[in-house]
Image (cartoon, helix red, strand yellow):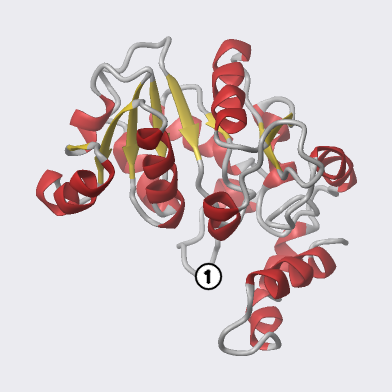
Amino acid sequence: MKIGIIGVGAIGSTLARKLSTNGHEVRVANSKGADAVKEFADEIGATPADAAGAAAGADVVILSVPFPKTSDLAVALEGLPASSTIIDTGNYYPDLRDPRVPEIDEGMPESVWISKQLGRSVIKAFNNILAASLAERARPAGSHDRLAVAVAGDDEGQKQIAMGIVDELGFDPVDAGSLDESWRQQPATPVYCCDWNAEETRTALAKAKKGVAPSILARLPEQFANLGPNPTHDQIVVSNRVANVA
């Protein structure tokens, strides 16, 4: 497939590297233009581009930029065919990293807001997995220790494409329902960054209680302060499992 990846931070760069290795035609971009990503693109066998160039003619576009910047991509995605799949990997961290968005604070799911800013249907995926897990914990289908990734969206065909990518990359895709239900996989919910398998992921999605996550998220600085300056991956997972259960 032709895949454009806009944003090459921890999640975006990992996805770009894996998808390029798997033989997809990958174009990568960030907010600074093609020259800024050329070294990384050359390293992984991808093509450097600006945001519009990464999206042009792509079968799939993966958005992996800081949450407030996602709405700036509407112009870059204008020429993208309606049949193309847009995957939103972002998360909203009000006051910790991001400016507040009143509609989200009032209960609108994050990716519903993104969809409205872009004027396009999006699929929510790869937002509830730690970057280290995505990079290092892929397993073949059927493995007892295979982790899962939640996938939400309204277009069933596009959702299946996203779920196929999840599976290809070594994780079990779990259908998390419509985009309106994607609040169940947002930060500080029971499914968020806890390294669950498919069955555990379904259980965690069902346990999510609407309106509870913001109070848990507000305690995030204290949570990580208690872990010390250099927490291990496993310490983060265990801490999330404890903190994200209301």
Q: Quadrant of the C terminus?
A: bottom right
Establish if 164 lies above or below 212. Answer: above
Where residue 161 appears, as percent x and y from the top left, is 55, 19
- At 35% from the left edge and 35% from the top edge, which residue is drawn? 20
Categorize mark 1 by other alpha carbons within 10 Å: few (<14), some (14-19), many (20+).
Answer: few
Per the image, label 1 sits on a secondary structure element best described as: loop
Residue 204 in the figure: left or right of residue 104: right
Residue identifier under label 1: 95
Where residue 43 appears, as percent x and y from the top left, is 23, 49
Instruction: Classify residue 229 by image quadrant.
Output: bottom right
Foreground: 137 or 95? 137
Foreground: 89 or 163? 163
Residue 69 in the figure: left or right of residue 188: left
Where residue 200 appears, as percent x and y from the top left, is 86, 45
Establish if 238 lies above or below 22. Answer: below
Foreground: 13 or 111? 13
Residue 237 in the figure: left or right of residue 163: right
Amino acid tagged 1: Asp
